[in-house]
Amino acid sequence: MSNKWPIYGSGQAGHGRCATEAEWRAEFGRIGEAQVSVLVRDGIIPEPKRQAGFRWLGDQAQARRAREERTFNYVRWTFFAAVAAVLVGIIGIASTLMH
C-alpha cells in the first residue's frame, strides 16, 4: 500500500502547533472527510496529527449539521408557502364560483 499523502510534517523546525495544525487542516480539506476518517480510524498517521484529524472531523460534522438544519428550515417554510398559495387559490376559485 503506497502512501499518497504527505503525513509526516509534524517535526519541522520553526513551526508552531497552530501553524502545523492549520497546514494539517488544509491537507484534510484537500483529501476529504472519507479519507481523513480512514486515516484517523486506522491510526496510520502520527498521534498529534491524528488528534487534529479528530478535531477537524468534529468541526466538519458540526458544520454539516448546521447546513442540514438551515436546509430543513428553508424546505419547511417553502412547504408552508406552497400550502398557503394553494389555500388562497382555492378561496379565490370558490369566491369566483359563488358570484
Image (spheres, helix red, strand yellow):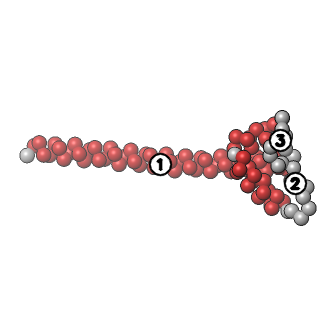
Q: Which mark is residue 3?
A: 3
Q: Nearer the viewer, mark 2 or mark 1?
A: 2
Q: Nearer the viewer, mark 1 or mark 3?
A: 3
- How far from the left and from the top, in percent, is residue 70? 52, 50
Q: Secondary structure at mark 1?
A: helix
Any part of residue 47 in sight: no
Residue sitting at x 43%, y 45%: 76
Q: Is residue 64 left or right of residue 71?
A: right
Of 87 and 13, the residue lying toward us: 13
Q: Is residue 92 left or right of residue 7?
A: left
Provide the residue designation for mark 2.
10
* Amino acid type at image mark 2: Ser
Of 39 and 30, the residue lying toward us: 30
The 10 Å Cα crowd at callout 2, few under 14, some 14 to 19, many 20 or more, is some
Q: Secondary structure at mark 3?
A: loop
Residue sitting at x 91%, y 62%: 13
Provide the residue designation for mark 1.
73
C-alpha distance separating marks 1 and 3: 42 Å
The 10 Å Cα crowd at callout 3, few under 14, some 14 to 19, many 20 or more, is few
Residue sitting at x 61%, y 47%: 64
Q: Which residue is at the far top? A: 1
* Amino acid type at image mark 3: Asn
Q: Quadrant of the N terminus?
A: top right
- How far from the left and from the top, in percent, is residue 72? 49, 45
- How far from the left and from the top, in percent, is residue 34? 70, 40
C-alpha distance separating marks 2 and 3: 16 Å
